[in-house]
Image: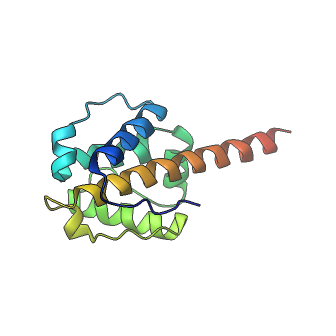
Amino acid sequence: MITAPATGDLQGNLEKLRSELKRARFDGELGLDLLAGGDPVGFLPLLHFALLRSSKNVSRWLVDNGYDLFGKTDLRFVETVYRLVRQEFGYRHTLTCKQFLSVGFAERKILFAIDLLQLCRAKHLELGREAGALRK
């Protein structure tokens, strides 16, 4: 279960995000200025990576469960991400989609990205265990 980290330490949470991205083998460019300013342009690639590129198992699982995240506007993409984390992971984010797509709320967005990466890693491990059990 993911615990809600405290806000008030922007630099510490940025470092935690960098650590999670490194653990997930993020190969894109990380715009720290965009993230620190709460610009959604910096966060959308992170959401896309966490759900669609960090694990083939997770992306396949999303497709199997009817989630289409490609070819959407930013608003529709974020709405779909919010719906899937709520329905599949039981996670509710403190920001609305409109707030997420506005400039600001940097620390809340960073915390959401961290949580999403952790949820996807846990789902990846769970799917791997299930696949291993089926092979036996």
Q: Is 47 on the left-hand or right-hand side of 129?
A: left
Q: Is 132 on the left-hand or right-hand side of 64?
A: right
Q: Residue at x 16, y 44 (%)?
A: 34
Pick the residue in front: 38 or 15. Answer: 15
**Quadrant of the drawing holding the N terminus:** bottom right
Pick the residue in front: 98 or 62. Answer: 98
Q: Is 112 on the left-hand or right-hand side of 23?
A: left
Q: Residue at x 53, y 69 (%)?
A: 90
Q: From this viewpoint, is residue 62 visible?
A: yes
Above or below residue 134? Residue 5 is: below
Pick the residue in front: 17 or 69. Answer: 17
Above or below residue 102? Residue 31 is: above
Q: From this viewpoint, is residue 73 visible?
A: no
Q: Is 3 on the left-hand or right-hand side of 70?
A: right
Q: Residue at x 37, y 57 (%)?
A: 112
Pick the residue in front: 113 or 28. Answer: 113
> Residue 93 placed where, x, y %?
38, 68
